[in-house]
Image (cartoon, coloured by chain):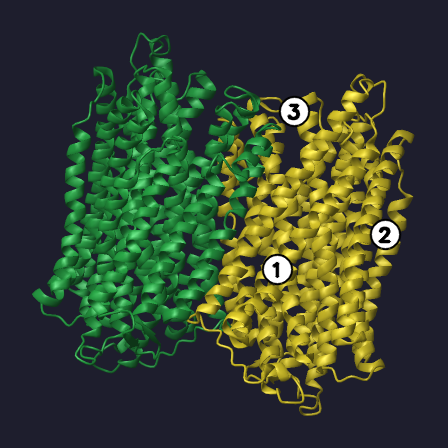
Chain colours: A yellow, B green
Amino acid sequence: MTALLLIILGGLCAVAYGIVTINDVMKRDAGTQRMQEIAAAIAEGAQAYLKRQYATIGLVGIVLFAALAFFLGIKVAVGFLIGAVLSGAAGFIGMNVSVRANVRTAQAASTSLGGGLEVAFKSGAVTGMLVAGLALLGVAFYYLYLTRGAGLAPASREVIDALVALGFGASLISIFARLGGGIFTKGADVGGDLVGKVEAGIPEDDPRNPATIADNVGDNVGDCAGMAADLFETYAVTVVATMVLAAIFFGGQVDVAGRNVLEAMMIYPLAIGSSCILTSIAGTYAVRLGANQSIMGALYKGLITAGVLSIVAIAAVNFALFGGLSTSFTTSTGVSFTSGGLLGCAVIGLVITALIVVITEFYTGTNFRPVKSIADASVTGHGTNVIQGLAVSLESTALPALVIVGGIISTHALAGLFGIAIAVTAMLALAGFIVALDAFGPVTDNAGGIAEMAGLPSEVRRSTDALDAVGNTTKAVTKGYAIGSAGLGALVLFAAYTSDLDYFIANASDTQYRFFKGVTVDFSLSNPYVVVGLLLGGLIPFLFAGMAMTAVGRAAGAVVEEVRRQFREKPGIMAGTDRPDYGRAVDMLTRAAIREMIVPSLLPVLMPIVLFFAIQLVAGKSQAFATVGASLLGVILTGLYVAISMTSGGGAWDNAKKYIEDGHHGGKGSDAHKAAVTGDTVGDPYKDTAGPAVNPAIKITNIIALLLLAILAHA
Amino acid sequence: MTALLLIILGGLCAVAYGIVTINDVMKRDAGTQRMQEIAAAIAEGAQAYLKRQYATIGLVGIVLFAALAFFLGIKVAVGFLIGAVLSGAAGFIGMNVSVRANVRTAQAASTSLGGGLEVAFKSGAVTGMLVAGLALLGVAFYYLYLTRGAGLAPASREVIDALVALGFGASLISIFARLGGGIFTKGADVGGDLVGKVEAGIPEDDPRNPATIADNVGDNVGDCAGMAADLFETYAVTVVATMVLAAIFFGGQVDVAGRNVLEAMMIYPLAIGSSCILTSIAGTYAVRLGANQSIMGALYKGLITAGVLSIVAIAAVNFALFGGLSTSFTTSTGVSFTSGGLLGCAVIGLVITALIVVITEFYTGTNFRPVKSIADASVTGHGTNVIQGLAVSLESTALPALVIVGGIISTHALAGLFGIAIAVTAMLALAGFIVALDAFGPVTDNAGGIAEMAGLPSEVRRSTDALDAVGNTTKAVTKGYAIGSAGLGALVLFAAYTSDLDYFIANASDTQYRFFKGVTVDFSLSNPYVVVGLLLGGLIPFLFAGMAMTAVGRAAGAVVEEVRRQFREKPGIMAGTDRPDYGRAVDMLTRAAIREMIVPSLLPVLMPIVLFFAIQLVAGKSQAFATVGASLLGVILTGLYVAISMTSGGGAWDNAKKYIEDGHHGGKGSDAHKAAVTGDTVGDPYKDTAGPAVNPAIKITNIIALLLLAILAHA
């Protein structure tokens, strides 16, 4: 109980940090009248979009809430509601800070690079801490209520189902927000560039372009709110899955030599999360521009601080919960390990995070071979730029995959499946800091736009551009990190599925879990249905990504039409005598994005359900369970590679363009630059729509499969 | 024995068809002096390339021959040699016909479209029949020698190992030829276009471009010889794997009610192959341009003829070998099915082939939504063209995957794993016809180039362009077909691996198979090493494709340098007063392609070996076997999607360009056309280098794993 309260205190610290930092950011100078006007237009558009998005998700959510309440009871439905509402809240608040910080960053950057970095990073840190804090608080509070308030046994089905439903709520918001936001932001970006840069020949962020506000709105609803929902979900699902695994592995161990092992194991992931919120906050204070003016260097200082402190903090948690590092445990499946082994797994999780950051920086940073090779290939034209970009995107999957494999092997050797789960938990525990790294990207992107539109001196734009280039890398980092943790977490989620299934089968009788009577599931690769599951699961990321790319193309086409119409009907816009109707473009994109997000989002949601009943029809229940289980691994297997290649490749394309704009290969306006703009355009939906949306698609498939088991168990 | 001789007779029919048709093609009018000069230059370049390629592969081959002879005995090494030599021969002869048919096609097309189609298709049919015929003869003769000449038992390890080694020989040629040829052809194509069309502003195939002969050479060494080696390998490996499975499943059944079930089952795949060579030949005579001048329609007539006759022929085989359709069998693993069930599986294999043809035509044909959507997206620029092309490429994986899954489920229901193997065999049995469809593509492509260079009237070019557009679709068809069969065949190869493993483990003692003593392999998805294997196997296609794309980029860059040098040193070239040195470009590309093919080719070859020993070191033999086994499925799982998306996407890009050139969206020279040229350039290495080379990469991984088992068994 004391431990749980301390954990909740850690979560509250994140919220407190958020409030203090919001106040700090809001006190900064918001710049000129013109700058504030622009920022207000962006804020208005972003809020309008989010409202409509949440209203649409709300409709789906109400149906699902009712369905969950009907099939699995009110506690489960409430869990779903908590996950959804908190995820939405994290995104909404983060975005609201972001749309206020952008103009202040532009203003601060007019004084110094360090000033701009500070404001942008702080506003990102608010989103980061809220993501981690609210996710932790949601799970911890609901667990506290279920086990203490409602008096349920920690390892009971009701607690497990309710926690899984909480993850489902977060997943649902996440997939819609990632995809809808991604379609909005890249529809605006691609469409605006096409009609502005290419057709009208005006620079990016030119106030004469009617799509320019929409572009800036997109940064906030996609890269900020969408990303926040994604990481909230990743965090919540990981913690929940680890708790479920703890419940399964230590279910009977409420008193082992006077120690409540079950309780300790179930709150261990929460404790790791809570303690790492504190170290993440400490890390944010270490982000400071050094004498060398290296922005990435400043961010690394923070990351290293947070990482090193986290090792100490998790060790302390081990002492507090397990009484030291040599205490040994044995799971119900017979795997033995020590508290120190678990600490080792957590450290491996942190090391994986660090490696993914370094690898992503290598593939997307302007100082390294991959980005330079794309820039070089731009000299010979659009085609070779895209070829080299695709080559880099495909290649960039190798090192992260090896790191993940190394993580699986080493943590499994230390503490079996539970060790893997703890490693992922430790990875995600730093989410507060990692999201901070990411969320500063859209703020600086916006700041650059505002500087351009408000006609600030070009030095300001140079500062914001430098911040933005690093933002491209850090945005890729977060995506690699999220998908990497999903790769490692796949085993955990799959284990949760198989363990649940085993439980229902073992306890099936005429009075309970009747559906599972006589079911025997063969998960061996020799079972053709396992291969069928792997193949069909593996298809999802490809099909889903293809649909997302098409959606962006369509949304961008709609923007082009709208902007052309405005130019045609108001000839004064190009002359600067008439103001474009920014709101119409935002409104049109909002409708397009919401419309386009529905079908692709439902694909991973419905896949496990349709697959189950289709195979049940053809080959019976047992094979249906095997197929669905295998499909979960299939999704992660191709999803990992599709997502990493898209997010790294997209980041590399973007920064190859920036590298040329920095004066290489003829700089801005050269043929190489034109080719690089093409690559950047291609990379846009790759890195900001399709790629990142694959991550929640993977998770939601897994969660749906777990809920399907629960529903079948109640049937 | 009679049956085997009849089978060999079928194979000889293919060779006879080849000889007759070569004579027929050679008798055609070879056109003007200028046309013959150009054709001679292409032929010379192609031969020079193939010689150097085979010399390089020969070096690797000698080492492997010696290694196989040392580890597994001379019979196994000879099997390897047969596979390699016949595969090389099929490609070499096919290419030699192709470089003679191109000029005759150009000449025939100057009379009529139908005439051009006839010559081009016939020359393609030579390659097709040689691929199927030589592969069949190689396997059948060696099997005859081993079981009759050397007197080995059909299901003995020596026979199995020797046949697998034959597949390995074919695979080795295939991966090098596909990749080397692919790098050559696309390096020339992309590089030539960049420096010709973009920099010098001269049209494609302009004789002033020093890379133009190299481009035409590439069609022959990549799309003809490389493709032939690939399909030879697919055919040989499939037949061998099915025979291996027959040996395992029916090993003890040399006398069941007076019938030698083992022998019948082992030669059944050979009999299917032999009978379908006859139906394929019949099909080629049905290819005839109708009144509607639909080229695709003419090809469909042939395909439908071949397909329908094949059903009859395979039914006849069933009667001859099994005495009817109701004879029932039971495998050593306890699966029962009838002869009619096997016929059903074969029919399903043919249906899958037909469906893949139709689906590929939908995704790559100029009459359907996907290609039109790319053409539409070209209007708004390079970026949107590429985005839409990528969207189509990702989406195009869905239907083939569903077809393959349907095939797995239905054939498995009919006759278990052996049913799946028979379905793949039946698919591949039509290889003679399908390769004919493909190999006519490079001939028409060359014919167009010759027409352009020799200054033939523009109607000729129009006819060859129409043939070429269909060629883009049929080339995509073959690739989809090859990779689709690999998807279905993955289970067969994996089954061969697990069955071999089971055999060695069951028979391990101190005197034989000592390495396998005490090994227990867990192929369940719950085993983390299975997930590790799936992940690492899944990485191969991504990394391999990325390396292939980079290689093409580098080779194209080298071409650009060379052409620029020639333009600089001989200013008379552009004025038409000086002749470019075509040979230098060919020579330079030859060296570049050979150099670039080595490292990526070794990746799938070494992966299973390195993986085995690395995991053995970390986690012991048992987990090493599990990891390698899982990696085989991992390779196929991502490989299937990567390859289909690349080959379909690339075909769609190419035809979107052709669609615009046909006068849509402003036609040639419009901005939309420029964007479509970019898409085509990107699609080039996608569809002709990286995508198709994934197929042999998958197969070679599987074959290496089987050989690794054999070597460990001998250790």
Residue B578: image x %, image y %? 30, 10
On the same chain, marks 2 and 1? The answer is yes
State which quadrant residue B210 falls in.
Answer: top left
Residue A552 located left or right of residue A34: left
Question: Which quarter of the rendering shows the C terminus of chain A?
Answer: bottom right
Can you identify the residue that label 1 sits on?
A698
Can you identify the residue that label 2 sits on?
A21
State which quadrant residue A371 falls in.
Answer: top right
Q: Mark 2 falls on what kind of element?
A: helix
In depth, the one of A509 and B116 nearer the eye is: B116
What amino acid is labelled 2 in the image?
Thr
Q: Residue at x 15, y 56 (%)?
A: B8
Q: Label 2 vs label 3: CA separation?
A: 41 Å
What amino acid is labelled 3 in the image?
Val
Can you identify the residue that label 3 sits on?
A198
Q: Chain of mark 1?
A: A
In depth, the one of B505 and B462 nearer the eye is: B462
User: Comparing marks 2 and 1, which lies closer to the viewer?
Assistant: 1
Question: Which quarter of the rendering shows the N terminus of chain A?
Answer: bottom right
Q: Label 1 vs label 3: CA separation?
A: 37 Å
State which quadrant residue B478 falls in.
Answer: top left
Residue B689 located left or right of residue A160: left
Residue B630: image x %, image y %? 42, 66
On the same chain, marks 2 and 3? The answer is yes
Q: Mark 1 falls on what kind of element?
A: helix
Q: Label 2 vs label 1: CA separation?
A: 33 Å
Labels 2 and 3: the sequence-earlier one: 2
In depth, the one of A599 and B596 nearer the eye is: A599
Question: As displayed, is residue B229 above or below residue A708?
Answer: above
Whether residue B709 appears in this view of the structure is yes
Query: Crowding at label 2, few (<14), some or many (≥20) Cα neighbours within 10 Å?
Result: some
